[in-house]
Image: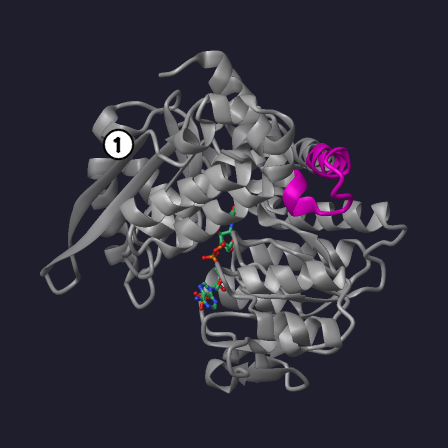
Amino acid sequence: MKPSQQVEKVLEHIKKCSPGQNEFYQAVNEVLFSLLPLLNEDSRYLEYNILQRIVVPERTVIFKVNWLNDKGKIETNLGYRVQFNSTLGPYKGGLRFHPSVNLGIVKFLGFEQIFKNALTDLGIGGGKGGSNFDPKGKSENEIMKFCQAFMLELYRHIGKDTDIPAGDIGVGSKEIGYLYGQYRKITNKFDGVLTGKGVNWGGSKARKEATGYGSVYFAENYLNANDDSLQNKICTVSGSGNVAIYTIEKLYYFGAKPVACSDSRGTIYHKKGIDLTTLKAIKEITRQSLEVYAEIHHDAIYIPVNKYPKGGHAVWHIPCDIAFPSATQNELTLTDVKALYKNGCKLINEGANMPTTPDAIDFIKEKGILFSPGKAANAGGVATSQLEMSQNASMQRWTFAEVDIKLHQIMRNIFDIVYDTSIEFDCKGDLMVGANIAGFKRVADSMIEQGSI
Ligand code: NDP
């Protein structure tokens, strides 16, 4: 059977046994088809049934989370931890708290995480977890109660040498604090079981900034490889959470001008450049809507979500040189990418996981727009989480600058391996193919070496 037929067969099987898990199917579809240049050249991966094996998580835990709301009523949510692949090291990947979380979302994120972590070359396997709990509109007390109830079950499945969760959408340093406090209380242990911890109690400096900074380092490397740079580039960034804020911060450092960002309710367009102090105050401290930004800066325009163009998102219809999708999956559609192209956008650099829809990716490739895939461009967060694990294990504390220098170097290495792999397989500049093949090869070769387990 030809490699392309094998790929079709695996996808068919996934469709049958994972019904309704559309995002998971989308992620697997993208990875497997982009592996064809490798599969055509090296028959070992098919001989050892690696494709069939790699798409199945090693372990999936789904559990009930009962917690007490402020009215004294018991609420119930679902919790998930998908331990996808531990060939290269302990499972590592974030926890997402968002009402849209379901098994398909957690599996897509866990699957992507395998290859992302492999690209960092830091000895970490892939996993992901979360809950359909919605932190929006909940009191501090309710968020703490939920985190404690969630950890009451999760603690038995994780460990500093087996599975080390971190944050993701809806899980920032505050939630990690509540989760860690409960873990410590239950187990009577102080160890590095979570990353993204507070810097006073085992967290790494620069972890908070790492995904956004890393995304910008990746973009700069990519532009340099094309005899260009971020200097004086107009940028748009979606989202206004952890990744978006530190992307904007680092863009200023490189002399670029970020003019737009968004949240689930609307978009801000500030032609003279997003004011970072205001953005941080609104989003990191008081967690308000971006509408407040326009109340403070009268020269900024606020576009509410219901004014978005049909099938698209306002933030991508603002003229820019470089777009940084940094909010969530499938947020950059064909309609959006057509607008970006029309407005002269040169590079789309994914800060979020799988933010670009498959038809939008096809259009990007057809038009030759530079494209940095998330599993490479946003790997700075997990890489710095691994640096946090190293510091915990060796009882060391590195300075912000030390961590940032290491992050910078890791992003350079990731860019190099992804770019070089794209050239090796005759897809020069197709970093999606380069990232998928390079990540897959590290994991698959190790799976073969470790035998059938
Ligand atoms: P945050 O929760 O800090 O921020 C998410 C932002 O995206 C918020 O501004 C939120 O709006 C917005 N958003 C979420 N869902 C939607 C939606 N459906 N439509 C429009 N806007 C939306 O998350 P992070 O910044 O940590 O994560 C962003 C992305 O980056 C995710 O894809 C995540 O998986 C990925 N990522 C994160 C890493 C990390 O280290 N944090 C590491 C690697 C990848 P609102 O404020 O209204 O909720």
Residue at (43, 54) in percent of width and height: 169
For badge 1, the amino acid type reads Tyr
* Magenta stretch holds residue 414: yes
Instruction: Please say if 439 is above or below 285.
Output: above
Marker count (numbered):
1
Residue pictured at 35% horizontal, 16% vertical: 453
- Considering only vertical position in the picture, is 286 above or below 40? below
Residue under numbered circle 1: 155
Q: In this rendering, would 8 be left or right of 188?
A: right
Main secondary structure type of the part rendered in magenta: helix
Whether 412 is among the magenta residues is no
Disc 1 residue: CB within 8 Å of ligand 1 = no
Callout 1: few (<14), some (14-19), or many (20+) C-alpha neighbours within 10 Å?
some
In depth, the one of 69 and 118 nearer the eye is: 118
Name the spot of residue 155 as percent of width and height, x first.
26, 32
Magenta span covers which residues?
413-434
Q: Which residue lies furthest to the right in this view?
A: 227
